[in-house]
Image (tube, rainbow, N blue to C red):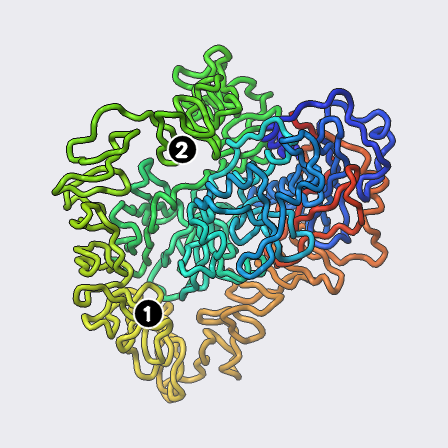
Amino acid sequence: MQNIQVYLQNLLKVIPAQGPNIFQGNDCSDIVVDKKYRTDGENNSDIHIWVAQSSKIQGLANAIYCQLDDTLKRVNYGRIKVNTSFLDKQQSNFGFKQDFNNILHECFHILGFSSGLYQFWINPQTGDYYNDQIDNFIRKVSIMGKETFIMSTPYVLATAKKYYTCPTLEGMQLESNGDVNFIGSHWKELILFNELMAAQSSGKDSQLSVFTIALLRDTGYYAEVNESMAEDFQWGRNRGCDFVLKACQSDTQYPEFTQKNYSPDQCSSKNNGYGKVKQIDLQDNCNTVQNSVYCENSDMNNHSNSYFFQNFGVNSKCLKSTAILGQNNYQYSNARCHIVQCSPDFNQITISFLNQQYKLLLCTKQDQGKEIEIVEGQPELGYVTCPDNYREFCNYTPECPNYCSRKGICILGQCRCQSGWSGADCNISLKDCPYYTLEEDPKQCVQQCPAGKFPNPDKVCRSNCPKGLYFSNYRKNCLECNYQCLSCSGPSNNQCLECDFLKYLEEGQCVNQCSNNFILVNQRKCVKSVDQGCEQECEKCDSKNKVICTKCKDQYFLNLNTGKCVAASDCPQGTFANEENNTCQICELTGCIQCQSQTVCQVCDEQLAFFKKGDLCAKCPQGCQKCSSDLQSCTYCYSGLFLFEGQCVKDCPINKFQDQKKRECIPISICCLMCWTKSKCIQCDSQHDLVHIYNTIYNCQKKSQHINQCNPPCLTCLPNNLNKCLSCISQFLLSNLCYVNCPDTYYHDYSKQACTKCKDGCLRCSSSSDCHQCDFKNGYKIQNENCIKQVDNAKDNEDSTKDNSSSSISSINNIGNYLNKEKDITNNEGITSNNENSSKKNGASSTYYNQALFLIIAFLLL
């Protein structure tokens, strides 16, 4: 919980309370408040939050505010309750991140994002509570045929219009699906997927966006909200009104709403992991990838994943890939986690295969969207498809090393450590090094940073200060920028380098709109108009900015993206020189990447399987990467499909081998029905038996040619029963049978090539020590990744909460982490059982389906 304190102290500033923080009532929801809080109060506290436990609440956690300070007009007491049945004491870095995001989500409900609090937000026109006037800003409208709540408070509405590029937007959608406690107190999952305050945000990859920053500003509770802590959120960004109002029902196929393909798993839209494409109620049953594997989770690095060239960690991203070691036709997901590094200009991506003989793969600018061999001339090792758009792929918020060792928080890729700790990953005690460490040599402790290096907040000497801070020559360290700047070169409000999302940079200052004689460029910056005449090739230009041409002279064509006049040959790809209006006009012919006119295509997009047919482009049949000139039959298939009789099929028929290199179905021995490779048959016809030749080679022989050979899929079998396996050729053994997928309550034991039983009370597990689902109906609950039988006389911890929760602590060192990995989180957020009215003392509850920490704490916002 110390990390929550550090985070909120960096995010929010308030007008401090004058005197102790006193609780006016007798209880905070279901917590009986100790007398000392009602009489003496808590010193040096702007907000006090109790974190309590219970094993009987529905869902995993819920939150409620308990008191508003009428003088300061903001929340000053609240309560979070977590379901201890879902807590896990196993500490892992990835679990720590999940826990941190989940408890932060609950804090934001108390800090303002709660339907019961909206009427007590501060109206900027009056300086008092909105009360009933909030109904003018939160109302119901019909979107996609459903009644939906929208929020149109000033900051939220302006942010939504700019973020989606939809100037006519009436408001930002709030969740209107799912459990009653989801509704109105979360962003709508469909259009803001995995935002920290979306209803189904998993905690594993949720992000704080400018939307929640805007909402905190609209509460009126906070003197400053630090937008530099907002992450680079991309879901639906600049997609327009159509995306917001129609989503997957639009005629436009947005990449956020994934189409199912032949692979069992697909990369998520932000390439941070992969999973199955599912339709979920909270996303209005649109197709979205639900991650089951997260590339940044270094706990996933093991032998079985290295077999598929997979590497996990903070620099790992998901790519479409068929990478696999050795000559093997094992059919696996066409999604992999690989270590990537993007060049600063986004023109090149380097893919690293750690611990492998084949170290690097380079995706150049020309390779965007192309499928390339991991090792040229060795297709059996698989292919990697370079991303379609390098800039979008590489535009992500970096993760901190080692998750700051759980002794700090990660802000835009750099740690902010707890008191007493320092270092790039907060693993250096100030007792060991009270000064600074070097970025290139963390073990070296120095009293002063070398020339050109600045002491950062983590006490590491770096060449730059982090975003939102500048280097002070007087103080010799990094200090906060003026609150009007997102980044800066000094302390004044005219030394800004970047501005908040809703403002524009004009000569070092952040302004609401450009001044006279300034024009807006790239929606971020106001640039002074020039006084000189139009450029040489330009006939007419912008009256404010002469470098922006509006009409070109003859023989030149206007590039509508840049406002420049260019020769016909210099019109950008995807446009053609239109002599009727002297512009580089966008080519609108389907599948065409280079037009002569709007009726004649010169070059078709073969990467998307479009080929010339007359003057136009036509698409090959489904699954074809290349096809015949008449476009009637396939000649080459996409990865994962195989050519058979002019069509691309997922599985080759009997007696055909799936050749990964040629992507074809080729004939095999007539007696072999199914095979692993051309020389490895796994099933023979009725007249032949599968015989082990040598190593991993099996062939079919007539029954008369051998004695007592096991029947497939057995590798070895009982002497008196050739169908009862003792081991399997390629599958997993259980009760003398071979399984491709182990049944429930068993897991794939790769070391034994067998199905091994999960521990008692566990319904689904991935190893003997890693249970994902317990048999709750029969009284088992999850604890330390094991299922523990609950005793009949166990009392709900709520009772003890009432007795003990009044004690508070402000320094926590022992944090419980890593929670249940795989849970169905549809329509099941925690529910608060008490019936508080919407008074300013005890607020309506707002809940969140996920795990949190079991602690009791009071923390201070500075």
Q: Nearer the viewer, mark 2 or mark 1?
A: 2
- Whether 659 is drawn above or below 364: the answer is below
Q: Position of residue 725 (x, y in %)?
A: 51, 76
Quick one: SS at disc 2?
loop
From this viewpoint, is residue 779 visible? yes
Mark 2 or mark 1: whose residue is earlier in sequence: 2
Report the quarter where the N terminus lies. Answer: top right
Q: Position of residue 402 (x, y in %)?
A: 52, 37
Neighbour tally class for label 1: few under 14, some 14-19, many 20 plus, Cα within 10 Å: few
Report the quarter where the C terminus lies. Answer: top right
Residue occupying image coordinates x 47% and y 48%: 235
Tell me if 651 is positioned left or right of 221 in this view: left
- Whether 71 is drawn above or below 322: the answer is above
Residue occupying image coordinates x 30% and y 69%: 659
Residue closer to the observer: 185 or 432: 185
Q: Position of residue 173 (x, y in %)?
A: 56, 49
User: Label 2 sits on what residue type?
Assistant: Arg
User: Label 1 sits on what residue type?
Assistant: Gln
Name the residue carrying label 1: 622
Quick one: SS at disc 1?
loop
Name the residue carrying label 2: 524
Residue closer to the observer: 456 or 607: 607
Neighbour tally class for label 2: few under 14, some 14-19, many 20 plus, Cα within 10 Å: some
Residue 587, quarter of picture: bottom left
- Whether 388 is drawn above or below 124: the answer is below
Cα–Cα gap, marks 2 and 1: 43 Å
From this viewpoint, is residue 445 visible? no
Residue 774, quarter of picture: bottom right
Disc number placed over residue 590 in the picture, else none:
none
Tell me if 350 is positioned left or right of 333 in this view: left
Tell me if 372 is positioned left or right of 743 in this view: left
Q: Position of residue 401 (x, y in %)?
A: 49, 36
